[in-house]
Amino acid sequence: MSKELILAVVGLAILTSALFACRTSQRDVVDGALEHGVLLEDVAFTHGQHTRTYHFYQSRREQLGPKPLVLLLHGGGATIDNHIGVRGARWSQQVWIDIAEEEGVHVAVPQGLDNHWNDCRADCSHCGEQDDVGFLTALIDEIDRRYDVDRGRVYVVGESNGGYMTQRLAQERPELFAGMGVVISLMPADNKCQQRDAPIPIMYQVGTADSGVKYEGGSSGNSGTNLSARESIAYWVEHNQCETAPVSSMVEDGPYDDRSTITLELYDCPTTRTKVGIYHMHGAGHVPPSIDVQVSEAWESLAGVQNHDLESARAFWSFLKEFEH
């Protein structure tokens, strides 16, 4: 199945998520968190000729001074409702709402123009030409003006198309961010990003059986060509001047029969005071891992196996919160 067909079918499935009941009965993270913080939905923001919307979660946790900000970037064809789990939708990224409340973090979920991001894949035919770097940069300024952001602790976590966009920000505006998280996405082989020298911490979560973003690299039709997972990590290991031998460990295999295990490789980069990491999700497909928000077998038949040994959002936050600039 081509990447375009996979993402189109998955996007449709998200929009009709009520038909794909979750395998486990977990509480609605957003509704539970709303008892404490405030989720502002569909906040309008104009940049250039386009007015877009974003969801913003404002934690009520008592905390003096500015708060960290995490930008969550959805996948191609998805919406911010789908991505953060509101209005009946459920997705693994909704766990970020719990993290926001527990840790005193701002979370913003911006909508891509026509549900996509211009992520600088030179051979992507549907990524658009809009100025998404400018849009996201201006949005951070706007959120800071309204809600007081710790500008030394701004992070981005992106999924699929949003993961490519996260990598674009890491290459073109690294001075704005303290760290990046990329899930089910890799570095483009035909990369037109304006790469800069500044190092930045980055963590990946990648499925070895992902037929949309191929672990071994190669073409995904009109979505472009990727580097392999190894080549993607090698780029950042060299960029961040890391030690060439990672520390490897196995993530504990949980009680679920998910047909998937995870190996973590973590590279220390003492010269630049950064780190580079990758969770190799063995046997997993084009689905973020989650323990709390498990997709159905019907979903997995479209996008591949979902790993249930790792909570995607918590793993990213555990890595990212170590860094500030």
Image: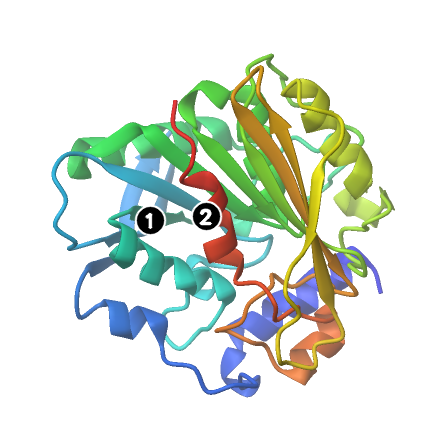
Q: As drawn, is 101 to the left or to the right of 290?
A: left
Q: Please, what secondary structure does the residue beneath circle 2 have?
A: helix
Residue 112 seen by the camera: no
- Residue 6 locus on image (x, y percent): 74, 64
Residue that appears at 74% across and 69% down: 260
Circle 1 residue: 107
Residue that appears at 62% across and 82% down: 296
The one nearer the camera, 86 or 262, is 262
Residue 170 figure quarter? top right
Crowd class of label 1 (few under 14; some 14 to 19; many from 20; radius 10 Å): many
- Residue 175 locus on image (x, y percent): 44, 19
Quarter that holds the C terminus: top left
Q: As drawn, is 248 to the left or to the right of 200?
A: right
Residue that appears at 44% across and 48% down: 317
The one nearer the camera, 230 or 187, is 230
**Vertical order, 82 against 314 (above or below):** below
Residue 176 seen by the camera: yes
Residue 318's tag is 2
- First of labels 2, 1 by sequence position: 1
Quarter that holds the N terminus: bottom right
